[in-house]
Amino acid sequence: MAEDGGRPRRGGPRARTAGAELPHPAQLAVGVVGAGRAGTAMAVALSRAGHRVVAASAVSDRSLRRIAESLPSVPVVPAAEAVARADLVLLTVPDDVLPGLVGGLAATGVPVAGRIMVHASGRHGLAVLDPVTRLGALPLALHPVMTFAGKPGDADKMAGICWGVTAPEVLRPVAEALVVEMGGEPAFIAEDRRDLYHAALAGAANHLVTLVAAAGDLLREAGVADPARMLGPLLSAALENALALGDAALTGPVARGDAETVAAHVAAISRTHPALLPAYLALARLTADRALAAGTLAAPDAQRLLGVLAGPLA
């Protein structure tokens, strides 16, 4: 664990790797800085695995309520104190706030040497932790591939999910052990591939919400009283097929090259929800490109279809 004044801090057994004394992730004292949705869920999961959450820091009312609901016995302290009390520190603030937080902690002189410093950002890898790594901290990027609601049951969602992990080679076993203890499966992501990794996840999950909500708007305009009831079975099947078959799962008028049907779609959306038209056109073009490349859309049909998507109505 971290050492102050030459005295080993509390914690589990140690393992020596490449000449360095590294903590084995057993019965660690955990500090939470930020108490975001993911960080709170991680703290609960680590507590269930036998670690001790000893301190948390938070600023917003929502974060304070989250701590009260999910970590009711954990004291709320300033960020520097949460770090000082811990062997493992969860830096779980928004992506854009993380660099400033890490730099600020390094500048304050709070003891970080020997402590495992973990962030849960999907975008960032290890470079964002450089200010504390230079002071002897042990850096890990552990990103749970899941969306959280900020509720006490969030930790239950971690069972069986994947985690995007970036870690120094010497710390990979520690990262893997922590992820497994939280019920997950680690997938190691190279430092220079974090942005691509995060773009894929954010595009799939966040844009899916926007797409489904927009489809619900169109259905309500068409007179459907319960769009969720209509969309649920369809989208569940589409997602299952897409995950299993990839582009071979494409169906519908774009994949078939039904240009007149797509033209009718464009006209209807233009009349009722013109703000949705650019997204429809962009996704239709991308779908056509992928169907053409996969061989499910013939070139002449694709040409007529793309003509509709680029024509006067578009």
Image (cartoon, rainbow, N blue to C red):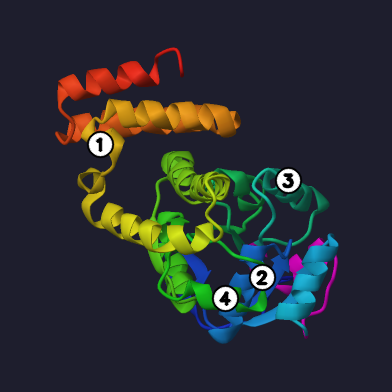
Q: In the image, is residue 295 above or below residue 94?
A: above
**Mark nearer the N terminus (2 vs 3):** 2
Q: Which residue is mark 1?
A: 255
Q: Secondary structure at mark 3?
A: helix
Q: In the image, is residue 86 above or below residue 100?
A: below
Q: Secondary structure at mark 4?
A: helix
In 3D space, how far apart are the residues under numbered discs 2 and 4 (Cα atoms)? 8 Å
Q: Is residue 312 visible?
A: yes
Could you tell me residue 160's position as x and y percent? Answer: 40, 73
Quarter-of-image position of residue 57:
bottom right
Q: Residues within 10 Å of mark 1 (few under 14, many from 20)?
A: many
Q: Is residue 224 left or right of residue 32?
A: left
- Write the residue at 48% across / 46% down: 198
Q: Which residue is mark 4?
A: 155
In 3D space, how far apart are the residues under numbered discs 1 and 4 (Cα atoms)? 40 Å
In 3D space, how far apart are the residues under numbered discs 2 and 3 (Cα atoms)? 22 Å
**Mark nearer the N terminus (1 vs 2):** 2
Q: In the image, is residue 105 above or below residue 273?
A: below
* Amino acid identity at mark 2: Thr
- Write the residue at 61% across / 61% down: 117
Quadrant in the picture for the N terminus: bottom right
In 3D space, how far apart are the residues under numbered discs 1 and 3 (Cα atoms)? 50 Å
The furthest residue to the top: 312
